Image: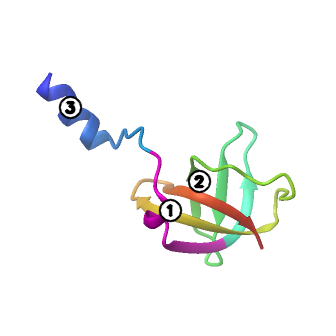
């Protein structure tokens, strides 16, 4: 049982949603929607970030500029942002 808990902690499997107090980091870029339904933020330096737990507003289309409020960056390839909120522009 202890090994399972350690494995979950190392894998980053958390079911808790971030609180508004944790959402203090901001990044701006362009939305890139993949065919498999994944959302990416492409930053100005062309770095791609997977948008984890992202809810994209209906008014935002592929290629639009977006601002993302997030809690953390998972250092993987591609990197992943744990998203709190996505805003247009």
Q: Quadrant of residue 67?
A: bottom right
What residue sits 38% from the left and 40% below the top? 14
**Where residue 60 sits: x, y (%)?**
83, 59
What residue sits 28% from the left and 35% below the top? 8
Which of the two discs, 1 and 2, labels the residue nearer the N terminus? 1
Q: Is residue 7 left or right of residue 23?
A: left
Q: Which residue is mark 1?
A: 20
Mark 1 or 2, which is nearer the eye? 1
Which of the two discs, 3 and 2, labels the residue nearer the N terminus? 3
What residue sits 15% from the left and 21% below the top? 1
Mark 3 or 1, which is nearer the eye? 1
Whole-number angstrom distance, CA of label 3 to CA of label 1: 26 Å
Report crowding for label 1: few under 14, some 14 to 19, many 20 or more residues within 10 A (C-alpha).
Answer: few
- Residue 51: give its label: 2
**Relative to 78, is 89 above or below?**
below
Q: Is residue 89 left or right of residue 71?
A: right
Among all residues in the image, which is located at the extreme top? 1
Report crowding for label 2: few under 14, some 14 to 19, many 20 or more residues within 10 A (C-alpha).
Answer: many
Among all residues in the image, which is located at the extreme bottom? 44
Q: Which residue is mark 3?
A: 5
Q: Is residue 23 left or right of residue 38?
A: left
Magenta region, residue range: 17-28
Please tell me whether residue 41 belongs to the stretch shown in magenta: no
- Residue 39: give its label: none
What residue sits 12% from the left and 27% below the top? 2
Label 3: state its secondary structure.
helix
**Where residue 38 sits: x, y (%)?**
66, 44
Whole-number angstrom distance, CA of label 1 to CA of label 2: 17 Å
Q: Quadrant of residue 37?
A: top right
**Where residue 32 sits: x, y (%)?**
73, 56
Mark 3 or 2, which is nearer the eye? 3
**Relative to 34, is 7 above or below?**
above
């Amino acid at each position: 049982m202890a090994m399972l808990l350690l494995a979950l902690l190392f894998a980053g499997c958390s079911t808790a949603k971030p609180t508004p107090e944790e959402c203090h980091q901001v990044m701006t870029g362009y939305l890139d929607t993949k065919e498999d339904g994944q959302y990416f933020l492409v930053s100005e330096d062309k770095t791609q970030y997977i948008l984890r737990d992202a809810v994209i507003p209906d008014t935002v289309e592929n290629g639009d500029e977006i601002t993302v409020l997030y809690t953390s960056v998972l250092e993987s390839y591609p990197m992943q942002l744990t998203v709190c909120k996505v805003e247009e522009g």
